[in-house]
Image (tube, grey):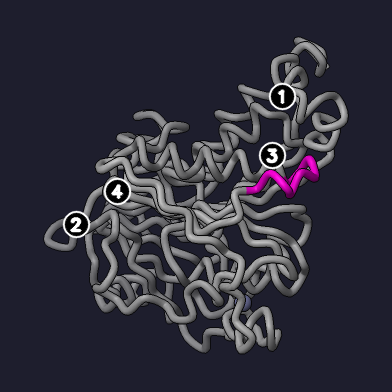
């Protein structure tokens, strides 16, 4: 390896008594999957890459957009202009930070079809997502395989996080038995989000990750920690006693999210992005070059190593980004019906 030796590179971290050379070696042997490389995921991935976690799997379904740059600190204007998938842009940036670790970008949407495969190698899963659908999926994979995971969320100037250890702590379904009904929750779309709360929550997640990976579970905060940085309130709700005897996931081991499968294309609005994702029921293997030729008379077409983009002319005006597995992001609308119609007209049913 060129550059500094591991001892030199991680000297300040090794000097911290609770890490030492043994702890550093454990970090180097660990594999962490980070789901979502948006605001939280950028901070988590940055800390864990610099800390020397040996293998990082970065999973994100979105592409870099200019509205991300206010808080998603691994990206710049060039990434947005190039329409790079966030997973790819983050992996590229972090590879330049630490060439001594393996970083694997996965520009896909975590789903019931791929979750166990994508997360199967991980010793730890860290949540950088922005929705309960993905979190319930992570929770089920984690409980089913006995792998710990770290929940995190931030909106406005508030956030919360919990470290979930299957068999030891309550799981996410114990803490949140039902998906909060649509409209009852503030989102980054309705309430905005300030970067410092994101950094705070993500930094706590990264610190918990370092404790877990070095085997120091007694140091975990052991709570559902709620933080409001605007009013400077830190409220830890103890996890002990929150485990539910009738929890369908960790008590009865029923994995409804993981066992569900889509019979038809699914749509999901991406929070704050004026974008709808359309996912085929079955992953496809598309010839993007062929489609690029076919679409060239419809509008402005751009083929990158990761996706095919089509800018539809006005009045539609939508930006259509298609991945090789058949997944598409339709920007310029919040309407699933519109996105489905455009998808059907360009890719088929
Ligand atoms: Zn549970």
**Is ligand 1 closer than 8 angstroms to the Cβ of mark 4?**
no
Location of the C terminus (image quadrant): bottom left
Residue 245 in view (yes/no): yes
Direction from residue 296 to residue 236 in the image, left or right: right
Circle 4 residue: 300
Circle 1 residue: 99
For discs 2 and 4, the disc positioned in front in the rendered view: 2
Circle 3 residue: 210
* Label 3: how many Cα within 10 Å (few below 14, some 14–19, many 20+): many
> Mark 4 or mark 1, which is nearer the start of the sequence?
1
Direction from residue 37 to residue 71 in the image, left or right: left
Q: Label 3, secondary structure: give it.
A: helix
**Is ligand 1 closer than 8 angstroms to the Cβ of mark 2?**
no
> Mark 4 or mark 2, which is nearer the start of the sequence?
4
Q: Which residues are magenta?
A: 212-220
For discs 2 and 3, the disc positioned in front in the rendered view: 3
Give the CA distance from mark 1 to mark 4. Answer: 37 Å
């Amino acid at each position: 390896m060129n550059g500094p030796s591991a001892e030199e590179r991680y000297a300040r971290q090794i000097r911290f008594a609770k890490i030492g050379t043994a702890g550093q070696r454990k970090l180097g042997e660990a594999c962490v999957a980070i789901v979502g490389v948006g605001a939280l995921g950028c901070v988590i991935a940055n800390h864990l890459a610099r800390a020397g976690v040996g293998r990082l799997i970065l999973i994100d379904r979105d592409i870099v957009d200019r509205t991300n740059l206010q808080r998603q600190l691994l990206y710049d204007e060039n990434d947005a202009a190039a329409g790079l998938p966030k997973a790819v842009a983050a992996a590229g940036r972090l590879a330049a930070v630490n060439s001594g670790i393996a970083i694997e970008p996965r520009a896909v949407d975590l789903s019931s079809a791929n979750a166990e495969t994508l997360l199967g190698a991980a010793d730890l899963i860290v949540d950088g997502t922005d929705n309960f659908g993905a979190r319930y999926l992570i929770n089920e994979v984690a409980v089913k395989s006995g792998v710990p995971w770290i929940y995190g969320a931030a909106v406005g100037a508030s956030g919360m996080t919990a470290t979930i250890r299957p068999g030891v702590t309550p799981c996410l379904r114990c803490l949140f038995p039902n998906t909060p009904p649509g409209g009852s929750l503030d989102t980054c779309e309705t309430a905005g989000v300030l970067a410092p709360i994101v950094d705070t929550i993500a930094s706590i997640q990264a610190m918990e990750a370092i404790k877990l990976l070095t085997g120091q579970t007694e140091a975990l905060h052991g709570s559902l920690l709620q933080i409001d940085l605007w009013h400077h309130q830190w409220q830890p709700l103890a996890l002990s006693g929150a485990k539910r005897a009738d929890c369908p996931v960790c008590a009865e081991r029923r994995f409804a999210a993981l066992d569900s499968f889509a019979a038809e294309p699914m749509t999901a609005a991406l929070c704050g992005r004026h974008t709808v994702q359309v996912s085929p029921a079955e992953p496809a293997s598309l010839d993007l070059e062929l489609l690029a030729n076919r679409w060239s008379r419809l509008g402005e077409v751009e083929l990158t190593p990761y996706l095919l983009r089509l800018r539809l002319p006005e009045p539609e005006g939508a930006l259509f980004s298609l991945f090789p597995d058949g997944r598409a992001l339709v920007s310029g609308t919040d309407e699933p019906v519109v996105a489905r119609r455009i998808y059907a007209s360009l890719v088929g049913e």
